[in-house]
Image (cartoon, rainbow, N blue to C red):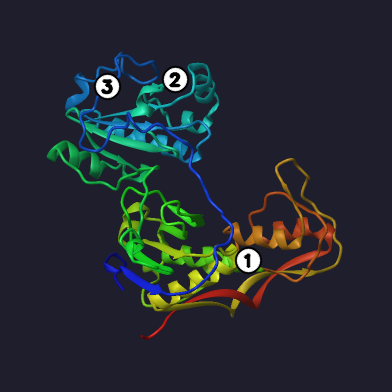
């Protein structure tokens, strides 16, 4: 199955009544000053900046280098995680690139942020930072950070995602003067069924396409289309598996956490359905889908999700369902009350019940899947642990013991169907 070549339209003629409205709105932003890829870059007359090795930000002098504007926020974990990578690229390719962080916060706030962030200190991050910016954000508006702009020779060559800031992309632009990267546009829109909406007396339509460049990712949502007066349910630029999980969670949430270890793939290539290797935008461009369903009537998400899931099953030739599988697991059982040797510190966590503890154990990465046979509703305090013995020591006062054994555990199955 080649998702990029898949564009399916199915029309159903139904007579149904219009229900109530459920809509989502985006924050209103003035896009009249926004610059686009291919435009000439109009630099600010002056900027306030701090840190870094530059004495002055001379945009004209920087035209012979690739200039990367990295818009960030101090409360954005991904932004902070990215900064050491940017610093390494700056250090290695200083003759070819100039990376500049751009923030909207004031100097005092940013000085306090850099002074108190041990992670950035340890990684010797010292890139120039434009602070209290309004001009650049007006030219490159966005709702989510990081937000990255590639400039070269006075032109805008890319407005893209943080994963695209690589040595390969910097060198490609520097050496060839051109580059084609995925477009990050937090205000992009797409009407997958624009042509279908012109069909007279249309009752229902279903459209599934591949990735749409320049359109922000969107989860399951239903809204009233003011033009057609019909309700549209959409999922935009998502992995097939993530679309399926969105639907199944809307229908009825699973009684268990569904990590990758609890997904059974009965398919030729699981990596066509989900970004298992966390590649990012390049994977999504190749394998992501957009879904849009038009209806005359509004239905609650729990009902609409079942229809959407059936559409995905029928169009993509798959079926998904819950089952069980025998797997080696950490099992929480009732045991004798025991004293703990571990000192109680403030670094632990209070779990609402034994199920919450089992889910945390499973997601910790230290152990395989976890099963709760205790079914306790009491709060459980557990500090840090690195192995089963350390965990069991802390479980002692609660009369709980964790053992590793084979269990039939719930799993989620994705299966391809012969058509």
In this view, the residue farthest toward the left is 176
Gap in angstroms between the C-alphas marked 2 and 1: 44 Å
Residue at the spot 37% in from the left edge and 26% down from the top edge: 127
The kind of secondary structure element at disc 1 is loop
Chain-order first, disc 1 or disc 3: 3
Chain-order first, disc 2 or disc 1: 2
104 shown above or below 227: above
Quarter holding the N terminus is: bottom left
Is there any visible trace of residue 295 in the rendered image?
A: yes
Residue 295 in the figure: left or right of residue 214: right
Residue 179 in the figure: left or right of residue 402: left
Residue at the spot 50% in from the left edge and 73% down from the top edge: 15
Where residue 159 appears, x then y in whole percent? 30, 39
Front-most of 39 and 300? 300
Residue occupied by mark 2: 132
Q: Quadrant of residue 312?
A: bottom left
Front-most of 55 and 384? 55
Where residue 276 appears, x then y in whole percent? 42, 62
Residue 66 in the figure: left or right of residue 48: left
Residue at the spot 45% in from the left edge and 59% down from the top edge: 234
Residue 316 in the figure: left or right of residue 259: left
Where residue 309 appears, x then y in whole percent? 49, 71
In this view, the residue farthest toward the bottom is 418
The numbered mark at residue 88 is none
Front-most of 221 and 284? 221
Contact between marks 2 and 3 (CB within 8 A): the answer is no
The kind of secondary structure element at disc 2 is loop
Residue occupied by mark 3: 43
Residue occupied by mark 1: 253
- Label 3, residues with CA under 10 Å away: few <14, some 14-19, many ≥20: some
Is there any visible trace of residue 262 in the rendered image?
A: no
């Amino acid at each position: 199955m080649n998702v990029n070549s898949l564009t399916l339209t199915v029309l159903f003629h139904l007579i149904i009544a219009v229900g109530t409205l459920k809509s989502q709105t985006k924050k209103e932003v003035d896009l009249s000053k926004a610059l686009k890829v291919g435009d000439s870059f109009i630099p600010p007359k002056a900027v306030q900046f701090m840190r870094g090795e530059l004495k002055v930000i001379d945009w004209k002098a920087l035209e012979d280098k690739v200039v990367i504007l990295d818009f960030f926020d101090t409360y954005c974990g991904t932004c902070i995680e990215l900064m050491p990578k940017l610093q390494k690229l700056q250090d290695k390719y200083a003759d070819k690139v100039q990376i500049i962080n751009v923030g909207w916060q004031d100097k005092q706030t940013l000085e306090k942020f850099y002074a108190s962030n041990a992670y950035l200190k340890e990684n010797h991050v010292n890139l120039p930072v434009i602070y209290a910016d309004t001009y650049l954000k007006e030219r490159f508006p966005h709702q989510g950070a990081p937000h990255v702009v590639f400039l070269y020779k006075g032109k805008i060559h890319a407005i893209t995602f943080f994963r695209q800031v690589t040595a390969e992309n910097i060198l490609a632009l520097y050496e060839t003067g051109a580059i084609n990267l995925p477009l990050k546009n937090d205000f992009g829109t797409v009407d997958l069924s624009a042509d279908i909406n012109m069909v007279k007396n249309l009752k229902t339509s279903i459209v599934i396409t591949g990735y749409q460049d320049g359109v922000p990712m969107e989860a399951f949502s239903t809204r009233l289309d003011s033009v057609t007066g019909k309700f549209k349910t959409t999922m935009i630029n998502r992995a097939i598996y993530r679309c399926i999980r969105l639907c199944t969670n809307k229908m009825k949430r699973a009684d268990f956490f569904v990590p990758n270890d609890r997904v059974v793939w009965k398919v030729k290539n699981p990596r066509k359905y989900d970004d298992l290797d966390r590649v990012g935008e390049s994977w999504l461009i190749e394998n992501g889908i957009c879904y849009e369903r038009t209806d005359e009537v509004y239905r609650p998400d729990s009902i609409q999700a079942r229809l959407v899931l059936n559409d995905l099953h029928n169009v993509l030739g798959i079926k998904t369902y819950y089952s069980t599988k025998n797997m080696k697991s950490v099992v929480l059982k009732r045991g004798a009350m025991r004293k703990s040797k571990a000192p109680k510190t403030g670094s632990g966590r209070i779990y609402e019940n034994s199920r919450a503890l089992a889910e945390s154990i499973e997601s910790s990465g230290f152990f395989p899947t976890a099963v709760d046979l205790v079914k306790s509703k009491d709060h459980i305090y557990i500090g840090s642990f690195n192995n089963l013995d350390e965990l069991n020591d802390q479980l002692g006062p609660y009369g709980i013991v964790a053992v590793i054994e084979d269990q039939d555990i719930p799993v989620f199955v994705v299966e391809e169907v012969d058509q």
